[in-house]
Amino acid sequence: MKVQISDEAELDLVDGFWFYENQDEGLGSTFRNSMKRDIRSLEIHGGSHSVKYGYHRVVCGKFPFCLFYRLESASLLTVIAIFHQRRGEKWIAKRLGKRSG
């Protein structure tokens, strides 16, 4: 499956990178590489995750983040957002625009 990343999700990656980079030099790169691995895993596992707020949600492995994505077709998905797991339900619902599912 082909995976594309929305502009908003790219900004989420940049924000996460700088958050961790400001904690410890080099940690931002570790974060980015970990997220990229999780995103690449969607090429194989896309569509197999639970749905929340109308999007599929992946709990990331190394960092406490979730990826939200939607299936565009049988061969394409789009990563919509990448959030820290501690984000509040209201914040996430507002950012994603709560959809059925």
Image (spheres, rainbow, N blue to C red):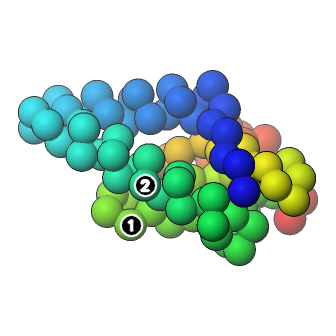
Q: Nearer the viewer, mark 2 or mark 1?
A: 2
Which three-letter amino acid code belongs to the residue tagged 1?
Gly
Label 2 and label 1: CA atoms lie apart by: 9 Å
Secondary structure, mark 2, is helix
Q: 77 or 7: nearer the eye?
A: 77
Q: Camera-side residue: 42 or 16?
A: 42
Instruction: Name the N-terminal-most of marks 2 and 1.
Output: 2
CB under 8 Å between discs 2 and 1: yes
74 sits left or right of 17 in the view: right
Q: Which residue is mark 1?
A: 61
Q: Label for residue 37?
A: 2
Report the residue at 47% width, 57% height from top. Answer: 38
**x, y percentage for residue 30?**
24, 46
Q: Is residue 87 visible?
A: no
Count of residue discs: 2
Residue 78 appearing in the image = yes
Q: Position of residue 41 (x, y in %)?
A: 54, 62
In which image quadrant can residue 52 be found?
bottom right
Residue at 50% of width from left, 47% of height from top?
83
Residue found at x 72% / y 44%: 78
Q: Amino acid at mark 2?
A: Arg
